[in-house]
Image: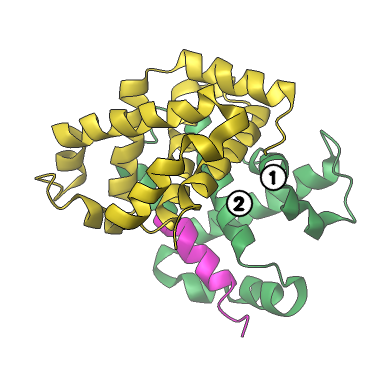
Chain colours: A green, B yellow
Amino acid sequence: MCMAPKPWTFLSFPETKTYFAHFDLSSGSRQVQAHGKKLADALTLAVSHLDDLPAALSSLSDLHAHKLKVDPINFKYLSHCLLVTLARHHPGNMNPEVHASLDKFLSYVSNILTSKYR
Amino acid sequence: MVNWTAEEKQIISAIWAKINIEEVGAAALTRLLVVYPWTQRYFSNFGNLSSPTAIEGNPRVKTHGKKVLTSFGEAVKNLDNVKATFDKLSQLHSDKLHVDPQNFKLLGDNLIIVLAATLGKDFTSEAQAAWQKLVGVVAAALSRNYH
């Protein structure tokens, strides 16, 4: 299920593809699926460290700041697509309060990942 | 003018025909006020917005949500002329309501999440892409007359 947000992000926000020019972006791409899993695993890690997120995400934060340099807007696009995907798959569970908590969490994670940018 | 493919137009109309405007409108506005509480600044005369439960049960939120989405429907019916369709509404939001245009984006994205929750698997990635484009066009049209 967590593989879904990536291709969706590429379709709704094509500018996000600029970071994956070296990938096969065709439908069903193994590279995209594998990368989606990496993302899902990182979020799973984050969920289990809600009380010390900056520490838990420190090396990922370094990576995004010094190597990947992904423009901050893209974290918003991906977070939004994650929420859309969750809403599609779990409509009964995505009530406004759950949505608010998830949005807050993803926003916080995004902030940490861009916190060392300058 | 916006370039819509025939497929995008078809997707947008098909989804519009499937949804209950009253319910989806109310849900979208409710979500905006719950998920982004600072948006409550525009609704100080709506009564009790003190908790998610209060917001979800607030009759003024429901009525206004329906009003907003009904208005949004004018864009769906006039896809080739959204700018002109919202000319006066844009002026109203700028000069009278003083709404930060960022809120149009927030509401648009919330609407899409409600559509996803409402339609489930029927809300395909192509459907999201078409609707992201539409909410972007509507947001731009509503922002157009700000000065």
The span picked out in magenta is A104-118
Callout 1 and callout 2 share a chain:
yes
Q: State yes or no: discs 1 and 2 in contact (Cβ < 8 Å).
A: yes
Question: Which of the image's four quarters has the C terminus of chain B?
Answer: bottom left
Q: Residues within 10 Å of mark 2 (few under 14, many from 20)?
A: many
From this view, report whether residue A60 is shown above or below residue A28.
below
Give the label on residue A78, or none. 2
Choose top left, top right, bottom left or bottom right for residue A59: bottom right
Seen from this angle, which residue lies furthest left?
B47
Instruction: Label the magenta part by its dominant secondary structure.
Output: helix
| Residue B76, numbered circle | none
Instruction: Say whether residue B12 is left or right of residue B23.
Output: right
Identify the subunit bearing mark 2. A
Mark 2: secondary structure: helix
Query: What whole-number distance in Å separates the C-alpha atoms at marks 1 and 2?
Result: 7 Å
* Residue at the image position 23 percent from the left and 31 percent from the top: B62
Q: Position of residue A34 (x, y in %)?
A: 77, 47
Q: Is residue B9 left or right of residue B31?
A: right
Observer-nearest of B42 and B26 = B42
Asked whether residue A20 appears in the rendered view, the answer is yes
Instruction: Reply above or below: B16 against B143.
Output: above
Give A23 or B144, whichever is nearer the viewer: B144
- Amino acid type for the residue under numbered disc 1: Lys
Name which residue type carries label 2: Leu
Disc assigned to residue A6: 1
| Point 28% across, 47% down: residue | B33
Number of numbered discs overlaid on the protein picture: 2
Q: Residue drawn 62% across and 30% down? A: B80
* Picture quadrant where residue A74 is located: bottom right
Q: Is residue A3 left or right of residue A113?
A: right
